[in-house]
Image: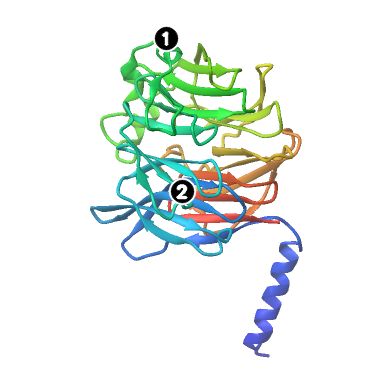
Amino acid sequence: MTLSLARFLCALAALVAWVTPLGAESWQVQYLYDRSKSSLAISDLCFASAERGVAVGTIEEGSRQRPVALVTSDGGAHWQIVPLKEEPLSLFFLNESTGWMVTEKGLWQTTEAGKSWTKMPRVPAQIFRVYFKDEQNGWAAGARKTVLETHDAGRQWTRVAAAAEQPGKPETSAYGWIAFATPQLGVITGWNRPLQQTFPPALPAWIDPQAALRHREWPHLGLTLETHDGGKTWKSSSASVLGLVTRIRFGPPGTGLGLVEYSDSFEYPSEVYRIDWPGGGNERVYRDQNFAVSDVSMTPDGTAYLSGIEVAGELRSVIPGRVMVLKSRDLSTWTAIEVDYRAVANRTIMAAASDRDIWLATDNGMILKLAQ
């Protein structure tokens, strides 16, 4: 007996409903860049509210590269592509309309939720990331032991002296992350890595995989700056560590998550630590040889999320893997959340506007939202 198309589709829908229980959480695709002979590498994603979000990246078409921003004002239901003039590195938004974009050549500001950008006066160093406490006061972190501060909305920048007091040569040192747990408590993290650790093997990892795997994870200096008075003063410290601290995100007062990532040759691709601050304690809460975490998030109610890729081979930094997301309410038991089967990437980026409004972007042009 031949099954009609309508009956087949009804049977398929029933099967999907049985496999995925009604009301179960899942990551659903909101945007997918899918154009012939072209790709989009998303470098950062921010949502200042449940409605307004911005992603930035670069469209590659053969040898041509076009920096762009993706802008939404309806929670990701629709996205508009906005051309940019410089390749973007990172974003920071203070509110729905006002934000800053760090590029390879400088710093830009928007007061229109990413729909237009204005280049700011030249920053006196190469920077990777900014953080603004309000429209006037902010900090920038970058290469050569650089931490800068501004008190006039970025028109002028001065150096934070404590950043340069750290041990190690400036040419092999950098700061890459800024986070505040409260308006008074803030931290800036960085690293000092000797030249033989800073530069990769002579050939790319995908051409010479054995050389990449022989490139061992050596101890180096992790650099930290802390403030307990809203950035008026900073205290520096350093310690011998393995891996790089690539993310610190805070949730409820006094609690946060820190992400450490390792090279391909290390036993684990990443580790996640709970941060109790200002007490200063930390405890490892997650690591798995088969899950390379590339971002963490903690919502105001204390729910933690880890996003990354399922390790598909020894060269985990090169070979794309299936996107995975884990969730925990106690930082002890982690539960996998279903992710759209098309989500395959090398790295992921998360952005949360509230306990229920959470997004995820991949480095190959996909944006997903958590459906609850």
Q: Is residue 351 left or right of residue 255?
A: left
Dot label at residue 254: none
- For discs 2 and 1, the disc positioned in front in the rendered view: 2
Instruction: Tell me the residue at 31%/62% (across/down).
Output: 37
Residue 260 seen in the figure: no
- Residue 113 percent across, percent down from the top left: 48, 52
Callout 1 secondary element: loop
The colour scheme of the drawn protein is rainbow
- Residue 80 percent across, percent down from the top left: 44, 62
Q: Name the residue under label 2.
A: 111
- Residue 179 percent across, percent down from the top left: 55, 29
Write down the quadrant of residue 143 in the picture. Answer: top left
143 in relation to 204, above or below? above
Dot label at residue 165: 1
- Specify the farthest residue to the left: 63
Could you give the CA–CA distance between mark 2 and mark 1, rounded to whole angstroms?
36 Å
Instruction: Tell me the residue at 32%/29% (across/down).
Output: 200
Write down the quadrant of residue 352 in the picture. Answer: top right
Q: Within 10 Å of the Cα at label 2, are there few (<14), some (14-19), or many (20+) other Cα atoms?
A: some
Residue 115 seen in the figure: yes
Q: In this view, does 133 lie to the left or right of 212?
A: right
- Specify the farthest residue to the front: 152
The amino acid type, in three-letter code, at marker 2 is: Thr
312 in relation to 128, above or below? below
Front in this rendered view, residue 290 or 90: 90
Instruction: Tell me the residue at 65%/43% (across/down).
Output: 326
Write down the quadrant of residue 43 in the picture. Answer: top left
The amino acid type, in three-letter code, at marker 1 is: Glu
